Image (spheres, rainbow, N blue to C red):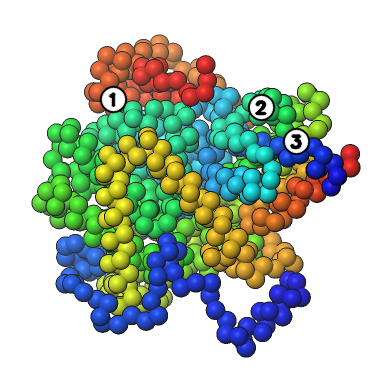
């Protein structure tokens, strides 16, 4: 540290050490003090509509949130070992993440995919990969989230259903979630990222196919999960995160109703996945406000009768944006505080982001620490023993009301422009995100968003060393070869015929539900990339910018 | 300094290679470079080493800047450097950013990467480093 800065910090005692501003991260004012006058209107109990204080009457007294750390690397086999390890130290749900080629439905041997195979998640291409991934795991006893968006979700869910069938697990007993949302699941709603390898409109159609298919056959399965986390991580604020996610969910609800489905049949199986950033009270208030708004939308706008249709059920991940490469151990403290905010916000499952996030995938050690963080909060602190312990706080109730108002305002703007999908295609969303990204940069320089050890109290002498997860380029080459060999050695005729049938089926009847035809292709040995290529041909999709 | 002024703004091609689409960092850096009087050509996502080099030549850039997140940095950077060597490009500097583990930073620098800006690098550090890079006598 420079001498001048050292002196300045030491002398802060005399001047009165102060924080940068008295605003929330999204720019709302924190009052000097909150009093009973800040609370207006009726206040309901937990489990009562509109569920501000939680969707269940007894919340964590009956059941703790699910510990659901994301995992996935290399192939199904390696990822299965990590899943078993996580379950052995107290993880209570699975959260499997595929690699980028899988997300984008490109086979490992595709020249565009080769450098990314097995890095950010598991390489899942054929039926056998899903069988490997869930080997020895009872699919009707551990709830399993699959982090995969449409159109890939259609192939993965087909593979999953086939694996369940082969093992004799009835589909109606499957418990878990397919994220499925093509607008948010990849990296949030950024235009180029999610329109380069597939048509966004047709991806939404396939997402709806998955929802429709699953709701009729696997009633305990969650058919879509709006990834508000990825929206937030593009740099937008809590208000935008909430409004964008709630707007997207409404787009799906409208389209499912248009397909002739009863709102109370499918709405209880819609979930959300939010971020929990660093502004402690704002994040808790955001979760409370989102519960309230969703309940009102479902009851008043979509005329739901079943209370479960009105429940805003959410998983969360502690935000990785404020985590730092500098002094990485500080991230343990950040994630701990964020996890506490999630618990006080009354969420259904938590992924506590690992402290080595700014370096690589988590090691076993850092993965375990995330689970321990949650267990310490659950079992040692006592915060789970009363429901919504912060309910009635003058500050929190006021902030919940203010956030609710702001989120409704923004929702109105989006609805006025024709809904989220329309706003996305018109690049309005892109503009909002770009502005906020530049703001993120500005706030970093101006320290309006202080990050200790980085733009505040930076210590260039720091040389903390941590263990870092290592990838293997040798493994990557082997995996690519494995898929090349698979394609060479399988029974060619059935795969070829199923792919042709899929292509012609979609060409002839592009609006029909495509899941059965996709499942047939999976069963007959086609790969993820081949299936999606057949659909790309059927809908005449061309990669933008290519001849 | 004289040379820098004589040739006007330095042109930098920025973008991502491979399939990773996390672009907060590189978009913010692009803005910082523009504000600091560099000319930025933003190639966006999903570039291949081949398309990157081709664009770099066409646009006559002084540097290529690429950001990574998911562990794909060695694969793509090695290919990019091989291509640049093949085409005997020696007047374009290579700069990287993003989530890159320390031991790979050393390896990438030994391959000829001029600078690697990992998460948390301050704006002024980047601008100073680039100004210095372009003003080094050849």
Q: Where does residue A406 sit, x and y in percent of width and height? A: 31, 59
The reply to whether dot 2 and dot 1 touch (C-beta < 8 Å) is: no
Q: Where does residue B19 sit, x and y in percent of width and height? A: 54, 35
Q: Is residue A19 left or right of residue A517?
A: right
For the residue pair A256 and A58, the one nearer the viewer reads as: A256
Q: Secondary structure at mark 2?
A: helix
Q: Secondary structure at mark 1?
A: loop
The residue to which callout 2 is attached is: B55
- Give me the chain letter of mark 2: B
Label 2 to label 1: alpha-carbon separation: 40 Å
The residue to which callout 3 is attached is: B62
The residue shown at (66%, 46%) is B33
Instruction: Say yes or no: labels 2 and 3 on the same chain.
Output: yes
Q: Is residue A543 left or right of residue A456?
A: left
Q: Residue furthest bottom?
A: A14
The residue shown at (38%, 76%) is A31
For the residue pair A78 and A363, the one nearer the viewer reads as: A363
For the residue pair A209 and A59, the one nearer the viewer reads as: A209
- Residue B138: give its label: none
Q: Secondary structure at mark 3?
A: loop
Badge 1: residue crowd in 10 Å (few <14, some 14–19, many ≥20): many
Q: Is residue B91 visible?
A: yes
Quadrant for the N terminus of chain A in the image:
bottom right
Label 3 to label 1: alpha-carbon separation: 49 Å
Q: Where does residue B46 sit, x and y in percent of width and height? A: 56, 32
From this view, report whether residue A57 is shown above or below residue A418.
below
Q: Is residue A28 left or right of residue B97?
A: left
Badge 2: residue crowd in 10 Å (few <14, some 14–19, many ≥20): some
The residue to which callout 1 is attached is: A514
């Amino acid at each position: 540290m420079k001498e001048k800065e050292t002196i300045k910090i030491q002398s802060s005692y005399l001047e009165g050490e102060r924080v940068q501003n008295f605003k929330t991260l999204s720019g709302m004012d924190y009052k000097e003090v909150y009093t009973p006058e800040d609370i207006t209107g009726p206040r309901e109990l937990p489990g009562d509509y509109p569920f501000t204080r939680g969707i269940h009457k007894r919340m964590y007294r009956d059941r703790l949130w699910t510990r659901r750390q994301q995992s996935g690397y290399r192939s199904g086999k390696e990822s299965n070992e990590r899943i078993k390890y996580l379950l052995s130290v107290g993880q209570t749900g699975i959260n499997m993440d595929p690699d980028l080629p899988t997300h984008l439905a490109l086979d490992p041997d595709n020249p565009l995919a080769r450098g990314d195979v097995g890095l950010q998640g598991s390489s899942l291409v054929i039926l056998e990969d899903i069988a490997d991934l869930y080997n020895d795991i009872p699919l009707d006893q551990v709830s399993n989230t699959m982090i995969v968006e449409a159109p890939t979700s259609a192939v993965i869910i087909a593979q999953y259903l086939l694996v369940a069938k082969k093992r004799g697990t009835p589909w109606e007993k499957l418990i878990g979630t397919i994220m499925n949302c093509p607008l948010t699941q990849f990296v949030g709603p950024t235009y180029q990222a999610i329109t380069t390898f597939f048509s966004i409109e047709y991806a939404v159609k396939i997402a709806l196919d998955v929802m429709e298919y699953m709701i009729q056959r696997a009633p305990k399965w969650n058919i879509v999960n709006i990834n508000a986390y990825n929206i937030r991580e593009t740099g937008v604020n809590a208000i935008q995160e909430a409004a964008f996610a709630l707007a997207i969910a409404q787009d799906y609800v409208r389209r499912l109703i248009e397909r002739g489905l009863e709102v109370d049949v499918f709405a209880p199986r819609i979930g959300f996945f939010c971020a929990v950033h660093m502004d402690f009270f704002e994040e808790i208030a955001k979760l409370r406000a989102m519960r309230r708004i969703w309940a009102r939308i479902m009851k008043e706008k979509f005329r739901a009768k079943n209370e479960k249709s009105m429940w805003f059920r959410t998983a969360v991940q502690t935000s990785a944006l404020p985590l730092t490469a500098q002094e990485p151990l500080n991230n343990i403290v950040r994630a701990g505080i964020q996890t506490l905010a999630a618990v006080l916000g009354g969420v259904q499952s938590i992924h506590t982001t690992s402290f080595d996030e700014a370096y690589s995938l988590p090691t076993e050690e850092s993965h375990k620490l995330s689970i321990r963080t949650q267990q310490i909060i659950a079992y040692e602190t006592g915060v789970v023993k009363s429901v919504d312990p912060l309910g009635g706080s003058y500050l929190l109730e006021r902030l919940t009301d203010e956030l609710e108002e702001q989120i409704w305002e923004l929702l109105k703007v989006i609805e006025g422009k024709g809904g989220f999908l329309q706003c996305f295609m018109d690049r309005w969303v892109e503009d909002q995100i770009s502005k906020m990204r530049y703001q993120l940069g500005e706030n970093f320089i101006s320290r309006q968003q202080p990050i200790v050890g980085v733009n505040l109290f930076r210590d260039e002498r720091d040389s903390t060393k941590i263990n870092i997860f290592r990838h293997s380029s040798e493994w990557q080459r082997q995996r690519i070869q494995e898929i090349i060999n698979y394609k060479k050695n399988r029974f060619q005729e059935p795969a070829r015929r199923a792919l042709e049938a899929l292509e012609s089926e979609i060409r002839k009847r592009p609006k029909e539900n495509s899941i059965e035809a996709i499942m047939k292709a999976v069963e007959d040995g086609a790969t993820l990339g081949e299936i999606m290529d057949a659909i790309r041909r059927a809908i005449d999709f061309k990669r933008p910018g290519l001849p | 300094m004289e040379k820098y002024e004589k040739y006007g703004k330095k042109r930098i091609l920025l973008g991502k290679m491979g399939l990773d689409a996390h672009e907060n960092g590189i978009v913010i850096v692009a803005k910082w470079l523009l504000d600091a009087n560099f000319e930025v050509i933003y190639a966006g996502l999903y570039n291949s080493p081949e398309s990157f080099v081709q664009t770099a030549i066409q646009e006559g850039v002084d540097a290529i800047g690429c950001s990574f997140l998911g562990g794909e940095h060695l694969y793509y950077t090695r290919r990019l450097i091989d291509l640049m060597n093949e085409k005997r490009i020696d007047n374009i500097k290579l700069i990287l950013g993003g989530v890159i583990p320390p031991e790979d930073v050393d390896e990438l620098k030994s391959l000829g990467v001029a600078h690697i800006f990992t998460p948390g690098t301050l704006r002024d550090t980047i601008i100073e480093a680039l100004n210095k890079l372009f003003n080094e006598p050849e």
